[in-house]
Structures are given as structure tokens and as C-alpha cells.
Image (tube, grey):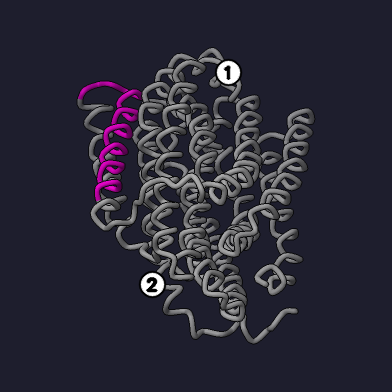
Amino acid sequence: MLTPGSFLDRSRDGRIRRLAVPALGTLAIEPLVSIVDTAFVGRLGTNAVASLAVASAVLSVAFFLFSFLAHGLGPLVAQDIGGKREADAQALAGNGLALAIIGGVVALAVLELAAPQLIRAAGGVASLENNAIEYLRIRALAVPALLLITLGNGVFRGHADTVTPLWIALLFNVMNAILDPLLIFGFGFGLAGAAWASVIAQWTGAIVFVAVLTKRSMLGAPRLSGSSRLLRVSRDFLVRTGSLVLTFFMATRVAATISEAALAAHQVATQIFFLLALATDSLAVAGQVMVGQYVGAADRSSARRVSDRLITIGLAAGLLTAATILAIRPFLGRLFLDDPAALAELSTALLIMAPVAIVGALAFVWDGLVMGAGDFGYLARTMVIASSVTIATLLWVQSQEGGLAGVWWSLVLLMILRSAMMIPWHRRLGAVLR
């Protein structure tokens, strides 16, 4: 049963703010630097941006498939901390470290060996193939580091510490921003320079994360007896995230069939959307931590009330994000592109992005609440449904030559379906927590 008063209950706003604001900084740094990468690469021409888009689509699959190391492991650690089971939290982090190392090595091997096939599967046409393959193979060297960084974020979130990851992320992403122009233009490496800058920066971040976790005794020895929790969550999360990544992968592929200009515009639009959506994603982090700790402490009432409040704040953040997109739309494109055809495509995508931001805000916050409650199975099932419908729509858009506008309206549909299926879950939230 819904309790309208809890949507307006501000008693936990202070803690939400203390968790969400540093998380926002951490989440914003990576896509902000990706946008900087895109801006620098944009000076190399439309072909370079399109090559970056195709390679990034492949890399996003590797990253998102292992994002359970933050979004899945974090709530489990929070539940252990809330239940005062410190040793279990340490062992869980140790299990996550083992998975990050093994998964990173496997992903690196796959990306290096199958780079040409993966680029073609992502829609890389002949004019893009060589640049995209070179970029992918260099960036793949950082995949193990990226998984260790993801693990670090998850463990710190579980301990309700979103400040330490912010400082570490700031360190290695500022390094990336400095290395970008130096390697791209100073040493004349071009697109490959952007890839090497990311590799150096992300390995620096991974080393710092592991060192700090070790110093603070947050990492314990892996424990086989406790691995079933993380493996179960990773299974559900792989289904959920794999469905989502496949949807965005297909969106990029359809954009690639339209034109090089449309693909470049889609790359820029996607980066802008994920950057501006981070305000609500940081609320999802707060939801993971707070709901997770309340669940661990068996405090169902607090879990429900903070969930209601986060939905209210998320809706407000989504409206603000949509207004920001519409306000910056007239002049934003020229920061990244100079091709008139690509600029026209980007203008269309940004206009459609506004409703995506509003509905997407609710979807992002609900994701965090479901993760905090530990109901990863529901998250997986609903994402499969929403993604299947959206992918079918994208294929129809391609067959009808619906253009980039059709691609982005398909993403609006994705967010509507995701949010709609979370409403019944929220209504029965009390039952989930019993």
C-alpha cells in the first residue's frame, strides 16, 4: 500500500544528500572525460568520431556485463554492514576481487582475439574498421583495471563511503584529460592516443583503489561458502545488464546503417544523455546503500519510506535534466561536431532526449531501490521484457528507414516500459522486505 506522506518526508534528505552528492561526482567524472575524449577526437574528423562510437559500443558490453561488481556487490556488502556482519562483508569483497581478476583476463583475451569480428558486429563499415579495431585493441588492455575500479566503487558504497571513490576517480580521470591532447596531438598518435591515455589513467586508478581497500581492511580472503550469494546476483545482473547493453548496442548498430553523420551524432548524444542522467543515477546509489542497510538491519519501515522519498526526488531531477537538455540544445552540438549533416542529426536526437530523461530518471532510481532490496531476479525479468520490445522496435525502425529520430524514440519506449513495470514492484515493496 502506498503511503503518500512518505513521498514528502524530508527527514532522511540529509543522508541521501551525503551519499548522492559525492556519488554524483564519481559517476559524472567518467562520462565527462568520455565527452572530453569525444571533443578531442572530433578535431580529427567525423570518421574518427564514428570509429570511436563503434569501438565504444563494443567496450560498453564488456564493462556493463561486469557492472554487478559495483551495483550488485555494493548492496550485498551494505546488507552485511547493516546486519553487523563485518567478516562476511570482507569475504564478499574478496570474492568480488577474484571475479574481477578472472573476468578481466577473460574479457581482455576475447576483445584482443575477436576485435575485427566485434567491430563488424557493432556496425563498423569498411571506412571505419581499421581505426576502430586499433582503438579497441589498445583500450582492451585497461579492461582488467576497469573491473578493479568497479569493484572498488561497489565495496566503498557498501560501507556507505561515496567520498573516497570520488577522490580516486578524480585523480585518474584528470590524468586522462591531461594525457588526451598530449598523446593525440602532441605525439601525433591520433585516435590511438586517446586509447593509450585511458589505459594509463585507468590502471593508475585500479592500483590506488586496491591499495586503499587493503589498507582499510575492506578486502578479506575469498570464501567459497559465501560465493553463492554473489554468483546468484551476478547471474541475474548479467541477464539484466546484458539485455540493456544489447539494446544500446543495437541502437548504435541501427544508427551505423543510416549514415556516418548519424552514427557520429548518436555517439555524442549518448554521451550527453548519460552525463546528464547521472543526477538520478547518484540517487540510485543512495538507494542501494540505504535500502540495503535497512534490509540488513530488518528495518522494513525505513526502507519503504526512503524508497518513496527517492522516487519523488528522482522525478524532480528528471524534469530538471529535460529542461537542461532543451536549454543547451541550440548550441551544444558545435562543441563536438562541425559537419552540418551530423549537427542536424544531433539536434533531432537532443530534442527527443528530453522525454527519455524524465522517464529514465524514474527507471534509474527504481533500479537502485530494487538492487538495495536484493530483488535482482525481478530486475532481470523486467529488463528482458523491456529490451526485447525495444530491440524489435529498433529493427522495425531500420526496416522502415526511420532515421536517428526513430532510434531515439525507441529509447523513449525502453524507459517507459522499464518504469511501468517497476510500479507494481513498488506497491508490494513491503512484501519484498519481509
The image quarter in which residue 137 lies: top left
The image quarter in which residue 189 lies: top left
Image coordinates for residue 103, horizontal then vertical, percent = 46, 33
Q: Is residue 184 left or right of residue 323?
A: left
Identify the residue under disc 2.
Answer: 18
Q: Amino acid at mark 2?
A: Arg
Q: Amino acid at mark 1?
A: Arg
Secondary structure found at label 2 = helix
Identify the residue under disc 1.
Answer: 120
Range drawn in magenta: 187-211
Residue 95 higher or lower than 370, as above or below? above
Name the mark on residue 94. none
Q: Residue at x 56, y 16 (%)?
A: 117
Residue 245 higher or lower than 155, as above or below? above
Along the line of sight, which residue is nearer the eye, 225 or 106? 225
Q: Residue at x 46, y 59 (%)?
A: 77
The image quarter in which residue 149 lies: top left
Q: Quadrant of the N terminus?
A: bottom right
Q: Quadrant of the C terminus?
A: bottom right
Image coordinates for residue 21, horizontal then vertical, percent = 39, 66
